[in-house]
Image (cartoon, helix red, strand yellow):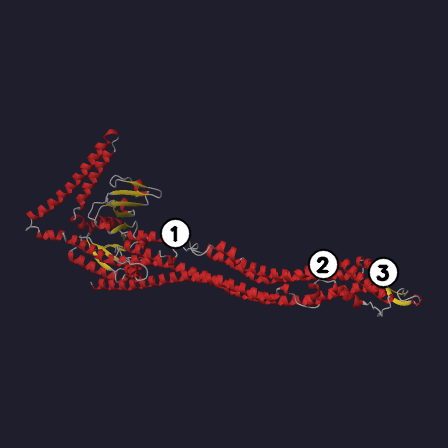
């Protein structure tokens, strides 16, 4: 069971019944994609594109990097490995990086930075090859269906890090150099060291050299499998020298005919086809001749033939070792794919954690500052009552008493004699004395208009007290909201930085919120709603004062005239009663008496202020309830967002748990494979 199969199987009971589908690597990746595309994980287009890349990687065959110091040996080995006269054994091709892939049509290309050009390898110019970044070869071959061959341009290329298997060609006559980078790679990747031998040495001497070389390699690269092969002998055993000559001649012949233009084009294509068939026929003839030669000289050449096939057997051992390494290489590749997915999911999970912590900061900030707002504004409401029932009420009382004093000061005591015409003839001659007042209306009204008078000064003081109380209350509300507003503004800026700038593109936002719209339209309203509640309550509380202020402005003169009229009417009533012989009491008009008359002229709200009776219109008793209701509403909104982000994070954490478990299982399986290989 492969790594991806283990991963998928664990998910079967949770999401999909997928395990019986295509068992190829690409099929397994598709099933993982179905799992991660579950709405639970909130996949984005970018995350889907990641799976597209992973699927392409799953479809790719294993990459085999062929490295070593001797470039000719590497080129020679490639030709032998696929048993084809693929490329000419020239220094021009030996020094270039060569990539060999499977295709149904055989072609050779020189790949440049901005293009790739089809070339005839046997007729290509030095400029064509030297200016190319690498040579790309497509060939229909069974071996290439599973592997892509990459010949390094030097002894060791950085591209080797991306390969799945390393084949290190080490010449017997080349000194073994210590290479730390190579040492790390052979430990990390499935690798084989292939010693290339020279038959110029005697058999015994060659065996001793091979043994010494293997010992030296095992000392420097512990656990590395070492095989050996004679490349030149193998090349001849496979008849590649003759095939190479035939391919070269055939390519030259094709190049000659391809140089023709015009009407002969179709004929040239026919000729090429015919020559291709002729080439295949010729190769078959060579193989037939080889078999015929074996049969005719069977007895004579048994030993000789065994010697000829000796290197071919070694090549078969190399291919068998590559096949065994492929199992471990596939596990490594699958682990790499899952680790790439794990890393992406880890970043997503970490960013959801950052986002969750960010909302928790807002929750804590709002709770702390809204508690302060509630406490401060309840205290402000109490302070307002103190201001209203002390400063403003005293100012209004002083203002009214100053009016009363102005009226009293402008009362002139007089004594008048009254005759009783209703008491009979003799009663008419018995006069009655009445102590009364004459009111100097003009001077009273002048005092109301005189800016220097105590009445006007007290009147302005009342208006000032009302205005000051209103402004101070509004300023206090604004001040109480500043910490929360500043905290929210800073939180929003941090959110833009965390989410819009640092958020990886494959993390979904639209599935649960849009930062700019959400923050500005909702979280800005955190303070706006509190401000509206407080301002509405302040407006209701100060509305009565504004009405008092307006009433005082509009009725100042009229109120005084009404009080004067009341006093005059009372004096007239006493005069009439005395004239009619009724017993009367003297009317004493002092400041308290006039003040009591002025109070009768006041509206109900103003009387309540003077009498220190709280008004129901102030709604101050509702303040705490309304603010706490708003606080709970905001807490619910923020907490809901925290729960939603936490839900996203739980999904990614579950994916990480399964991925981590699968990667650990893969490591154990890989260890078992390596152990089996060592035992073998």
Tag 1, which secondary structure?
Answer: helix
Count of numbered circles in the view: 3
Q: Which residue is under mark 1?
A: 45
Q: Residue at x 65, y 65 (%)?
A: 615
Q: Position of residue 341 (x, y in %)?
A: 35, 57
Q: Nearer the viewer, residue 635 or 21?
A: 635
Q: Quadrant of residue 573?
A: bottom right
Tag 2, which secondary structure?
Answer: helix
Category of crowding for the residue at label 1, using alpha-carbon neighbours closer than 10 angstroms: few (below 14), some (14–19), many (at least 20)? few
Q: Give the mark nearer the N terminus: 1 vs 3.
A: 1
Badge 2 vs badge 1, beta-carbon distance below 8 Å: no
Q: Quadrant of residue 554?
A: bottom right
| Mark 2 → mark 1, Cα distance in angstroms | 68 Å
Q: Quadrant of residue 594?
A: bottom right
Badge 2 vs badge 3, beta-carbon distance below 8 Å: no
Tag 3, which secondary structure?
Answer: loop
Is residue 616 among the parts visible in the rendering? yes
| Mark 2 → mark 3, Cα distance in angstroms | 25 Å
Q: Which residue is under mark 3?
A: 440
Q: Nearer the viewer, residue 97 or 655?
A: 655
Q: Residue at x 26, y 45 (%)?
A: 137
User: What's the mark number on residue 664?
Assistant: none
Is residue 156 among the parts visible in the rendering? no
Q: Nearer the viewer, residue 317 or 325?
A: 325
Q: Residue at x 71, y 59 (%)?
A: 549
């Amino acid at each position: 069971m492969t790594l991806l199969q283990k991963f998928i199987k664990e998910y079967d009971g949770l999401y999909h019944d997928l395990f019986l589908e295509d068992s190829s690597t690409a099929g397994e990746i598709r099933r993982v994609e179905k799992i991660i595309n579950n709405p639970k994980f909130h996949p984005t287009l970018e995350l889907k594109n990641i799976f597209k890349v992973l699927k392409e990687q799953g479809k790719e065959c294993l990459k085999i990097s062929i490295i070593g110091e001797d470039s000719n040996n590497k080129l020679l080995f490639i030709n032998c490995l696929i048993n084809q006269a693929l490329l000419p054994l020239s220094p021009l091709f030996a020094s270039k990086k060569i990539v060999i892939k499977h295709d149904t049509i055989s072609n050779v290309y020189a790949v440049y930075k901005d293009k790739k050009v089809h070339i005839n390898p046997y007729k290509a110019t030095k400029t064509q090859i030297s200016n190319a970044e690498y040579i790309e070869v497509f060939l229909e071959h069974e071996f290439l269906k599973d592997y892509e061959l990459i010949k390094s341009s030097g002894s060791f290329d950085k591209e080797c890090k991306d390969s799945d298997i390393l084949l290190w060609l080490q010449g017997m006559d080349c000194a073994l150099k210590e290479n730390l980078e190579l040492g790390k790679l052979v430990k990390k990747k499935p690798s084989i060291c292939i010693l290339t031998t020279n038959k110029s040495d005697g058999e015994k001497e060659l065996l001793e050299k091979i043994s010494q070389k293997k010992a030296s390699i095992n000392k420097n690269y512990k656990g590395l499998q070492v095989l050996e092969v004679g490349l030149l002998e193998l090349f001849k055993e496979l008849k590649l020298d003759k095939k190479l000559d035939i391919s070269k001649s055939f390519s030259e012949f094709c190049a000659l005919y391809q140089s023709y233009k015009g009407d002969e084009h179709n004929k040239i294509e026919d000729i090429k086809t015919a020559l291709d068939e002729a080439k295949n026929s010729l190769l078959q003839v060579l193989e037939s001749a080889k078999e015929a030669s074996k049969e005719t000289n069977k007895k004579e050449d048994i030993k000789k033939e065994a010697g000829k096939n000796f290197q071919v057997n070694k090549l078969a051992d190399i291919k068998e070792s590559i096949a065994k390494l492929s199992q471990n290489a596939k596990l490594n590749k699958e682990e790499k794919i899952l680790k790439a997915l794990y890393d992406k999911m880890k970043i997503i999970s970490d960013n959801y954690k950052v986002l969750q912590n960010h909302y928790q900061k807002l929750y804590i900030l709002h709770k702390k500052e809204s508690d302060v707002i509630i406490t401060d504004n309840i205290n402000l409401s109490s302070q307002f009552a103190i201001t209203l029932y002390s400063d403003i009420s005293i100012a209004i009382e002083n203002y009214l008493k100053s009016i009363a004093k102005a009226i009293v000061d402008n009362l002139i005591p007089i004594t008048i004699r009254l005759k009783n015409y209703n008491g009979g003839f003799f009663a008419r001659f018995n006069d009655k004395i009445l102590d009364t007042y004459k009111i100097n209306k003009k001077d009273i009204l002048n005092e109301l208009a005189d800016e220097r008078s105590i009445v006007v000064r007290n009147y302005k003081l009342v208006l000032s007290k009302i205005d000051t109380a209103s402004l101070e209350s509004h300023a206090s509300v604004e001040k109480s909201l500043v910490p929360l507003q500043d905290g929210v503004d800073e939180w929003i800026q941090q959110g833009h930085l965390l989410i819009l700038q640092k958020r990886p593109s494959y993390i979904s936002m639209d599935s649960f919120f849009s930062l700019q719209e959400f923050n500005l339209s909702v979280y800005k309203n955190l303070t706006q709603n509190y401000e509206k509640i407080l301002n509405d309550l302040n407006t209701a509380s100060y509305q009565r004062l504004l009405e008092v202020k307006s009433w005082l402005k509009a009725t100042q003169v009229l109120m005084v005239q009404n009080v004067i009229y009341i006093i005059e009417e009372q004096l007239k009533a006493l005069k009439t009663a005395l004239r009619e012989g009724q017993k009367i009491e003297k009317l004493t008009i002092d400041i308290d008496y006039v003040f009591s008359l002025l109070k009768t002229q006041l509206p109900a709200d103003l009387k309540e202020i003077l009498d220190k009776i709280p008004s129901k219109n102030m709604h101050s008793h509702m303040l705490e309830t309304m603010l706490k209701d708003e606080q709970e509403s905001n807490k619910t909104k923020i907490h809901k967002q925290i729960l939603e982000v936490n839900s996203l994070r739980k999904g990614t954490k579950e994916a990480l748990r399964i991925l981590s478990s699968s990667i650990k299982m893969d490591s154990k399986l890989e260890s078992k494979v390596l152990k089996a290989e060592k035992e073998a």
